């Protein structure tokens, strides 16, 4: 399952689903975000039965970036029951991302 875009209108419902939800806050002009994008897609596909994964373009969704105090991108936030439980900042290898997710779901 590929990542899905999320907006301020769909955000609360998206992160309140039955599975933990990973949200990738990114921007098109961000080099590290572009490097991390394929990794997030792979993790989304491989862990689709365990987590939902969304992408939030901080330029298009400034309200959400402000709401979650996003000051550096890429920032990934893992949510459970609609609440943030773990934040990761910066690009990372796939193994590290999976390890961070596994430790917090």
Image (cartoon, helix red, strand yellow):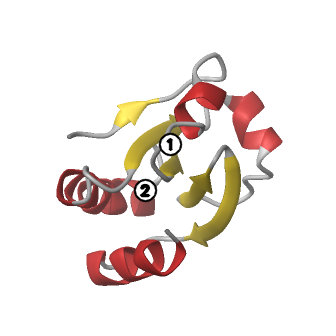
| Residue bearing the label numbered 1 | 27
**In this rendering, is residue 19 above or below 11?**
below
Residue 88: percent from left, percent from top: 58, 70
**In this rendering, is residue 67 above or below 33?**
above
Q: Residue at point 53% right, 74% down?
A: 104
Q: Residue at point 23% right, 39% down?
A: 2
Indicate the secondary structure of the residue bearing disc 1. Answer: loop
Residue 45: percent from left, percent from top: 19, 51
| Residue 5 relative to residue 45: left or right | right
Indicate the secondary structure of the residue bearing disc 2. Answer: helix
| Residue bearing the label numbered 2 | 33
Q: Residue 60, can we see it?
A: no
> Distance from label 1 to label 2 (Cα)?
7 Å
Circle 1/circle 2 CB separation < 8 Å: yes
Residue 54: percent from left, percent from top: 43, 40
In this view, the residue in front, 9 or 105, is 105
Quadrant where the image shows the N terminus: top left
Q: Count the marks.
A: 2
């Amino acid at each position: 399952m590929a990542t899905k875009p999320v907006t301020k209108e769909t955000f609360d419902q998206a992160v309140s689903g039955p599975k933990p939800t990973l949200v990738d806050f990114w921007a098109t002009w961000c080099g590290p975000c572009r490097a991390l994008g394929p990794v997030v897609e792979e993790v989304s596909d491989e862990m689709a039965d365990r987590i939902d994964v969304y992408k939030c373009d901080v330029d298009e969704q400034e309200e959400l970036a402000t709401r979650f105090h996003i000051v550096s991108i890429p920032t990934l936030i893992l949510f459970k029951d609609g609440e943030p439980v773990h934040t990761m900042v910066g690009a990372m290898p796939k193994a590290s991302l999976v390890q961070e997710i596994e430790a917090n779901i």
